[in-house]
Image (cartoon, grey):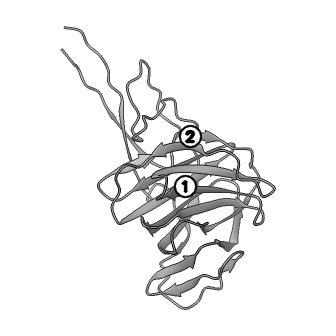
Amino acid sequence: DVARLHHVFTVIEDQNLLPLLFADPFDGADGSAWKDYGTASQRRDGHLVGTKGMVTILEKINETNLMASVEANSNAEAGVILRFHGPDNYLVALYSPSMKAIYLHDRKNGSWGDQLGRVAVPEIGPKFRLTAAACGSHAALVLTDGKRSYHTPTVEVGNVASGKAGLWLFQIGERQEFGTFELSRAQFGPATLKPTPQGVSGPADEYRPPQLPSPQDWVLVLEKVK
C-alpha cells in the first residue's frame, strides 16, 4: 500500500472563538455608534440599509487586530472595513456579485490597489455571512451561506496602524441590507497552504496548524489511500 496524506481544510465561521467587543443587530433606532462617510445609511427592520457609495464606520472602537462579521445579501456588493483612517485609507474585505469573487483591497490615498487573495465564488445562496480579520501585517476573509464556505488565503497588507471598523458598498447593486454586525479582537498568522480557486485548500506534503485563535475554524482530515 502507498499511503498519502490529504490535507483538506473546511473553513467555517465561528464567532465564539473570542469575546465580543461590540455587537449590533440593527433592531433599534439608535445609530449613534455609527457615522456615515459616504451615502446615508438607515436602520430598518433589523438591518442597516445602504446604497451605492456607502462607507459607514463604527466610531467607538479603534484597534489594530480586529475580526468583524456581518450578514448580507448576495445580490449586491458587501464589504467589511478594517483599519479605517478616513475615506481614502482603509482595508476592505468584500464580496462582488458581478465578479463572483471575494478579495481584499488595501486602499491607500484614494487608490484601490490590487485584488488581494481573490477567490472565485461560483455558487452562493441569497444570504451569507462575511467574516474579515486583520492581525499585524496579515488579513483574511471568509464567506459562508450555511452550506458553502469560501476563504481567501492570508494576504499581506501595508496598512498596519490601528483603526476603526465598518461596512461598505461601492457601486454594484442598488442597495445592501446588512444584519447583525459583530466585532472582536483577532490573532492569527499566515496560512501555510494555498487555496484552490474554489476556496478550499488542496493537498500538500507538510502541514503546520495556523496560530489560534484564527478568523476561522480549521478542520484537518487525514485520509489513507491505497
Q: Residue at x 78, y 66 (%)?
A: 86
Residue bearing mark 1? 132
Left/right of residue 216 with respect to residue 7 in the rendered view: right
Residue type of the residue flagged with mark 2:
Thr
Q: Quadrant of the C terminus?
A: top left
Please tell me which residue lies in front, 138 or 38: 38
Residue bearing mark 2? 154
Residue density around tag 2, few if under 14, some if 14–19, many if 20 or more, within 10 Å: many
CA–CA distance in space, label 2 to label 1: 11 Å
Left/right of residue 129 with respect to residue 112 in the rendered view: left
Q: Position of residue 202 (x, y in %)?
A: 38, 29
Left/right of residue 119 with respect to residue 139 in the rendered view: left
Q: Position of residue 160 (x, y in %)?
A: 74, 48
Residue type of the residue flagged with mark 1:
Ala
Occupied quadrant, residue 14:
bottom left
Residue density around tag 1, few if under 14, some if 14–19, many if 20 or more, within 10 Å: many
Please tell me which residue lies in front, 18 or 53: 53
Left/right of residue 72 with respect to residue 8 in the rendered view: right
The answer to whether 5 is drawn above or below residue 168 in the figure is: above
First along the sequence among labels 2 and 1: 1
Q: Residue at x 60, y 81 (%)?
A: 41
Secondary structure under the numbered disc 2 in the rendered image: loop
The answer to whether 211 is drawn above or below residue 3 in the figure is: below
Occupied quadrant, residue 165:
bottom right
Occupied quadrant, residue 52:
bottom right
Q: Residue at x 76, y 58 (%)?
A: 89
For residue 159, which numbered disc appears in the image?
A: none
Secondary structure under the numbered disc 1 in the rendered image: strand
The answer to whether 137 is drawn above or below residue 89 in the figure is: above
Q: Residue at x 34, y 52 (%)?
A: 123
Q: Quadrant of the N terminus?
A: top left
